[in-house]
Each structure stands twice: as structure tokens, then as C-alpha cells.
Amino acid sequence: MASPGKRREMDLMKLMMADYDVQMCDGDNVGAFYVRFHGPKDTPYEGGVWKVHVELPEAYPYKSPSIGFINRLFHPNVDEMSGSVCLDVINQTWSPMYDLKNIFDIFLPQLLTYPNPTDPLNGEAAALQLREPERYEAKVKDMVAKYAKPEDYPQGSTAGGDDEGGGEAKEDDSDFDDDGGGSMSSGGFGNGDDGAAKASDKRGGSGSRDADGAGPSAPDSTFDL
């Protein structure tokens, strides 16, 4: 098996060759970068574009990446304020056979396609989806129109731009470098070795966990890689 450093480079190249727009955070450092992610078709998120921060741990691929949404979205399993994602299932299923392309081809699209309102990070979104699904869908589309407009994240500009994705900004973005520098924290799911420490005051993650970490999860069948 390739060394961890070589595997990082191989997986990143594979992601780029799959036509994902990838921008490095810090020059040639392949351990941290942004990916331009499109909302999946036939969902209320269709037409939206999100800036996703990815950080690869030293032990990658033996530990999963840390991931965080930068611009806002309304979803039961995504914390609206921090961008952190309820993705413990990836920790339970992750193995070195998976790669970055699996995450953006399968896992994140399925997360947005199949929300799990029974174990939420966003209680308002979960309650609305369960009780008033039409209002929930309208709220999702409204948030997409405000914060995930494609023109705010044109091809090739993943590392820059307004991190709130247009509309009214909800919090101060002064912690983020306009050029996508390393001051931005990661978040969501993954190894969490330093994600939790960074996330307390920055958007993009509220702490991720190792593969055996406890926490809310969606049904295993939904996220079968």
C-alpha cells in the first residue's frame, strides 16, 4: 500500500480528475483544501453551490478526513451556525479503501438527499421536516437562494469569495483569510484530532470524532459507501 503522503496526493489528484473544483489552502500542502460542491439533483438543495473545507489527518487514509460546510444550509443534520455535520456513520464505516471521491460522489449527496430528523443537530429543521415538510422544503430553498448562489462561487474561485454565500451574513467572517489560508477551521466528520479545538470560534465544524466516537447518526444503509 502507498505511504500516507503518497496516498494523499493520489486521492487528491483523483478528485481533481473527476472535475471537482479544488483549491489548496496553503500552497502545495495537500493536507487542507476547499472543494466546490453542488447540491444533489431532485432535492431542495439542487442548484446550490457550497464551499467545503477538507482537512486530511496525518493518519489518512487510516483516519477519515475532517469536513465542514462554509456557507450556510438548512438541514436537520447540519449545525446552521457552525457548519458542522452529523456524520458519525462515516467514522463507523470508513476504511482505507475509501477515498475523497467517495465522499463527494456518494456520502455528501446522500446526506442531503436523506436527512435524518430523528437525531438532529438542527432541531428547527428536524421539527419542520417532520411536521410541515412543505414548509421545510421552502425554507431549504430560501436558504439556498440566499447563501448558496452559484454566482457567489464561480468555477475556480473556491478559495476566495464571501464565505456566507451571499445574502445577509449571520456571523463575523473576519477569522477567514480571503485567499483560503490556513486560519479557517475544518469540521463535520472525521478524525477530530485538532478540529474540535479550532471549532469553538470559527465556522466550519464543531468537533469531529474518531471512528469509534459516539454520537448521532443516520441509518447505515443510507450512507453505504
Image (cartoon, rainbow, N blue to C red):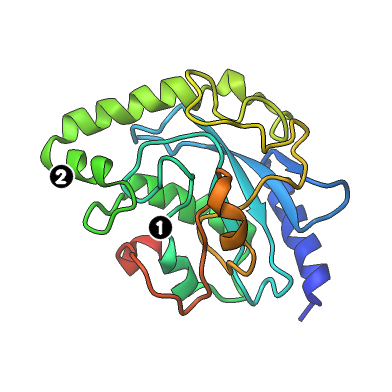
> Which amino acid type corresponds to the residue marked 1 in the rendered image?
Cys
**Residue in front for this viewpoint, 217 or 185:** 185
Expressed as whole percent of the image width and height from the top left, the position of residue 41 reads 41, 35
Does residue 193 appear to the left or right of 125 in the view shown? Answer: right
| Labels 2 and 1: the sequence-earlier one | 1
Q: Is residue 43 above or below residue 83?
A: above
Count numbered badges in the picture.
2
Question: Which of the 4 quarters of the picture holds residue 142?
Answer: top left
Q: Which residue is mark 1?
A: 86
Q: Residues within 10 Å of mark 2 (few under 14, many from 20)?
A: few
- Dot 2: what SS? helix
- Dot 1: what SS? loop
Q: Which residue is mark 2?
A: 130
Report the quarter where the N terminus lies: bottom right
Residue reaching furthest right?
Answer: 28
Expressed as whole percent of the image width and height from the top left, the position of residue 185 reads 64, 50
Residue at 50 percent of width and 27 percent of height: 148
Q: Is residue 76 above or below residue 213?
A: above
**Residue in front for this viewpoint, 159 or 222:** 159
Q: Is residue 187 above or below residue 158?
A: below
**Residue in front for this viewpoint, 20 or 200:** 200
Question: Which of the 4 quarters of the picture holds residue 35?
Answer: top right
Residue at 55 percent of width and 65 percent of height: 190
Does residue 47 appear to the left or right of 180 in the view shown? Answer: left
Residue at 34 percent of width and 65 percent of height: 217
Expressed as whole percent of the image width and height from the top left, the position of residue 184 reads 67, 45
Q: Residues within 10 Å of mark 1 (few under 14, many from 20)?
A: many
Does residue 217 appear to the left or right of 49 in the view shown? Answer: left
Cα–Cα gap, marks 2 and 1: 18 Å
Q: Are marks 2 and 1 in contact (CB under 8 Å)?
A: no
Q: Is residue 87 above or below residue 78?
A: below
> Which amino acid type corresponds to the residue marked 2 in the rendered image?
Leu
